[in-house]
Image (cartoon, rainbow, N blue to C red):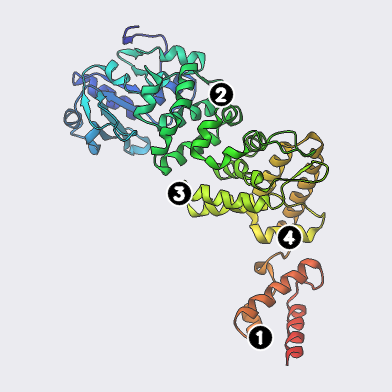
Amino acid sequence: MSESGKSEVKIRIPAAVATILEGLEAAGFQAYIVGGCVRDALLGMEPHDFDVTTDAAPQQVEQVFRAFTVLETGLKHGTVTVLSPEGEDGARVPVEVTTFRTEGSYSDGRHPDAVSFTKRIGEDLARRDFTMNAIAYSPVRGFADPFDGRADVKAGLIRAVGEAAARFREDGLRILRAIRFAAVLPGFRIEEETARAAKETRALLSRISAERVAQELAKLLCGSQVVPVLAAFPEILFQVIPELRPAFGFSQNNPHHVYSVYEHSILSCGYVPPAFHLRLAALLHDSGKPYCYAEDEEGIGHFHGHAARSAAIAEAVTSRLKLDRCTCERVRLLVEMHDIRWNGTVPMVKRLLARTGEEAFFELLALLRADTKAQAPAESARLADYAEMERLAREILVQEQCFSRRQLAVNGSDLLALGFPAGPELGAILDELVDRVIDGRLPNEQEALLAYVRNRLAQSE
């Protein structure tokens, strides 16, 4: 296929980007939008970012837009950022402009050792990862599509540009990107040779920084097709989360479960809302089961202590991925508490609210629902319990009922004024007051609580 060609398909380009394209073309250069923005537009999706590529060298781009602000954001790789004055209310919009380039070897398995500028758009597109991302479009010149990317977009195929294994050896992160695209683009699948090469070269992911792996993993797990993708490519997931490998094919031998530990985990992942920390918690919530398995005299499998073991694994995984502290703590909390069983009482709901906090409480319910949906069909009866827990929790919050020190009608200063000694005992008596209020043994009224503390002081004298 020829590199360029007119097409009836038109892509709506924002004014700020159009200004850059028009300026380069008026100066005698080629200019295209390229990559994900073209792919998304062809899919009928609203592109979030527009990248411009041109045969103009960076210094020439700076000269063309000398009346604008130009930032040398990636000069080594031929990229500058032009602040286009076409934004809303006169705001300047940053537009990345990169010179057509070819790349040398990738000795670190992630970045090219050197780049060379070229005048041919086809040579630039040849260095890209997948055909659907190797499409360029110009309102003046039409499409540049030397690898039939538009046909693959139409067919829903994720195909490597050229030899798949070579593309993955250049940049191991592309392996994870391939399955991420399959998870987030509905109806897309990875072309057979590309899929085979991704599996065979998966060890290259060990050379990728934890931060970049985490970024791709977050997008992957939040994809609408995450379950079938993780079912089809477990070995790639295990390359970045090896702690899940023992769960693969591990039979639970328990009437409450009809899936292996791994199947149950990925199904649970798909049942929770698409928030990274929630889906990661769902994926890891039973990771400790293979280490805690024991059979009773009837051959039924049990997993005593698996929640704590899974929480420890979750802590190790989130730490290795270098996730932020809040995410690490939330994932561990959800995994640690996922095995609770409600006793049908309001005090238990209040104590859970106190332990988790309001936001995490409802996330825990989401995880409990997902965990239940991924078990044997008969277990779905527990969903009614979670609905009642949610109703009670919202009632408690709306009515501002006491479930922690924050809602208690007295505070530490009140107890100190009574002569209660400062120190750990002060916190302990406040917790005791909360406990009694939750159980209904004391009303949450200042005088009643102070009277109880006075009595305690009198008894200790």
249 to the left or right of 107? right
Q: Choose between 126 and 193: the one closer to the eye.
A: 193
Answer with left or right where residue 24 lies relative to residue 188.
left
Give the mark toward the camera: 3 or 2. Answer: 3
Q: Position of residue 339 (x, y in %)?
A: 71, 50
* Residue 13 appears in view: no
Mark 1: amino acid? Phe
Q: Residue at x 39, y 42 (%)?
A: 209
Determine the CA span between mark 3 and mark 2.
Answer: 29 Å
Locate residue 15, reporting x and y percent: 35, 27
Q: Name the residue under label 2.
A: 186
Give me the C-alpha separation between circle 1 and circle 4. 27 Å
In the foreground, 414 or 189: 189
Distance from disc 4 to disc 2, alpha carbons, whole Å, reads 41 Å
N-term-proximal mark, 2 vs 1: 2
Q: Name the disc covering residue 315, or none.
A: none
CA distance separating discs 1 and 3: 44 Å
Picture disc at residue 350? 4
User: What residue is disc 1 on?
Assistant: 420
Q: Residues within 10 Å of mark 3 (few under 14, many from 20)?
A: some
- Crowding at dot 4, Cα within 10 Å, few <14 / some 14-19 / many 20+, comes out as many
Spatial distance from mark 2 to mark 1, Cα to Cα? 63 Å
If the image is split into quadrants, where does the N terminus sit? top left
Of helix, strand and loop, which one carries label 3?
loop
Report helix, strand or loop for mark 4.
Answer: helix
Residue 241 in percent (x, y) is at 52, 40
Name the N-terminal-most of marks 1 and 3. Answer: 3
